[in-house]
Image: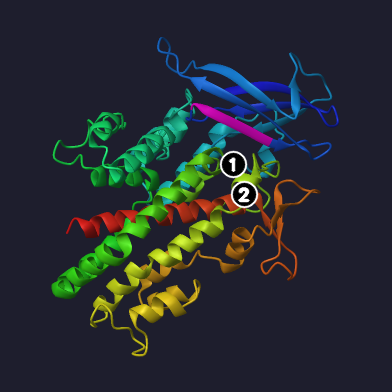
């Protein structure tokens, strides 16, 4: 379903017709750059599926962003095709007749099929849903999306704090609000079970992110059970408490600004990076809220992969606390290794090494120290100096959000493998 929203830019009074698709989230934000003055314009609206007629949602405008509504468009209005959860190729952005939503969805589905992210029969079914009669959820769910993630995270983070504060009576009332609670086996409804289920949904259909980690942990467990159990003991005594504080904090930061990240989450989960020249009107909703996420996530990942390093020591036939370089101890690894060098001991393990390949220390530095700025001449592009004083670099906003989602998916896989280790 495509909605036509007529706006006039408050900065230059240029007319814009947003041909906006509908995503699956209840609250949706469209932010684009004005074709004339390049300032950000857009709308925030809520949608609610009709209980009487499926596919006929009620749409309520919450506010306009640097713009005003108009009842009608005139010949001078610029039509822009946009979507809260899809990225359109450049040639589709200003097309008035094409069904951009369906075409972009088909490209995602075909990529997912070709790369083995989900069953071809189910994917073909999703595409068949898209073209004959599109509704607000067919694309999102067909590609492995989950409209309840944001709502369920709110429940989870509240239950997490209640657990930490020993408020079991209140916790028990809250946890049953979790969407999948009743579908979990009655013996699998611990908080760890619910966390695992949530993050499984979050990375779906890219379950291989987690499976590759579990395969390596199983390899270590079978190769040397005694050393594997020592890793578990070390984790529970030294790492668990601080790691889980970090997870709660970083995912609160992520889901607080889910509107930004969700626009590229489907692409990231099926590893389809938008090509250069895609939706050039894609600009930040509120960059000040997300500019530090990559750096904060980088800090967490490079700290938490210590667990992978210890497991890799076991896989390579050593005691869990013995490194290939005999001069390295756990204490030295923790205190003397830089964030970037902490992934070094994993290079000999393809699965673990591949898990860290997307880590970019230059982007980390710019994000962590807030050396990122939106380019005034092009709102969909970011400028940064990695060292604060070095050469000026550029990255598209699309690329930055894609990288942030990669970090979130990696963190989700890490907490899942920590839950696995706790349950052994």
Q: CA distance from mark 2 to mark 1?
A: 9 Å
Q: Mark 2 highlights which residue?
A: 398
Cβ atoms under marks 2 and 1 closer than 8 Å: yes
Q: Quadrant of residue 30?
A: top right
On the image, the x and y values in percent for residue 342 come to 44, 74
- The answer to whether residue 70 of the structure is visible from this angle is yes
- Residue at the (50%, 39%) spot, across then down: 106
Q: Is residue 217 above or below residue 281?
A: below
Indicate the secondary structure of the residue bearing disc 2. helix
Residue for point 41% across, 71% down = 353
Which callout, 2 or 1, points to the residue nearer the camera?
2
Which residue range is magenta in the image?
26-31
Q: What residue is rendered at 13% in x and 40% in y?
A: 187
Q: Which mark is residue 87?
A: 1
Is residue 271 visible from the viewing direction of this image?
no
Drawn side of residue 176 relative to residue 42, left or right? left
């Amino acid at each position: 379903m495509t909605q036509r929203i007529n706006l006039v830019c408050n900065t230059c009074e240029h007319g814009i017709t947003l041909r906006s698709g509908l995503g699956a989230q209840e609250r949706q934000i469209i932010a684009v750059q004005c074709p004339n003055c390049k300032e950000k314009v857009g709308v925030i609206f809520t949608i609610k599926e009709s209980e009487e007629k499926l596919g006929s949602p009620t749409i309520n405008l919450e506010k306009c962003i640097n713009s005003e509504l108009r009842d009608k468009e005139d010949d001078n209005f610029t039509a822009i095709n946009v979507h809260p959860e899809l990225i359109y190729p450049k040639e589709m952005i200003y097309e008035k007749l094409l069904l951009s939503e369906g075409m972009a969805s088909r490209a995602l589905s075909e990529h997912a099929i070709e790369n083995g992210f989900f069953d071809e029969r189910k994917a073909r079914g999703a595409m068949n849903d898209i073209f004959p009669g599109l509704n607000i959820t067919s694309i999102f769910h067909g590609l492995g999306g989950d409209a309840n993630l944001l709502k369920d995270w709110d429940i989870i983070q509240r239950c997490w704090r209640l657990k930490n504060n020993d408020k079991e009576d209140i916790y028990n009332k809250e946890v049953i609000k979790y969407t999948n609670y009743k579908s979990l086996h009655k013996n699998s409804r611990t908080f760890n079970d619910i966390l695992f289920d949530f993050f499984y949904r979050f990375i779906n259909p890219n379950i291989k992110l987690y499976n590759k980690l579990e395969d390596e942990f199983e390899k270590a467990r079978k190769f040397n059970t005694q050393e594997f159990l020592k890793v578990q003991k070390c984790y529970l005594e030294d790492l668990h408490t601080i790691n889980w504080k970090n997870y709660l904090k970083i995912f609160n930061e992520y889901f607080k600004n889910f509107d930004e990240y969700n626009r590229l989450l489907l692409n990231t989960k099926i590893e389809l990076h938008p090509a250069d020249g895609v939706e050039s009107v894609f600009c930040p909703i509120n960059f000040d809220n997300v500019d530090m996420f990559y750096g904060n996530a980088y800090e967490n990942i490079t700290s938490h992969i210590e667990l992978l390093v210890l497991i890799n020591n076991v896989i390579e036939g050593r005691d869990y606390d013995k490194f290939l370089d005999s001069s390295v101890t756990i204490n030295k690894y923790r205190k003397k290794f830089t964030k970037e060098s902490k992934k070094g001991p994993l290079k000999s393990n393809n699965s673990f090494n591949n898990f860290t390949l997307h880590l970019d220390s230059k982007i980390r530095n710019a994000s962590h120290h807030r050396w990122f700025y939106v380019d005034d001449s092009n709102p969909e592009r970011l400028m940064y100096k990695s060292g604060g004083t070095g050469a000026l670099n550029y990255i598209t906003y699309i690329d930055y959000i894609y990288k942030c989602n990669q970090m979130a998916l990696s963190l989700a896989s890490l907490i899942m493998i920590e839950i696995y280790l706790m349950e052994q």
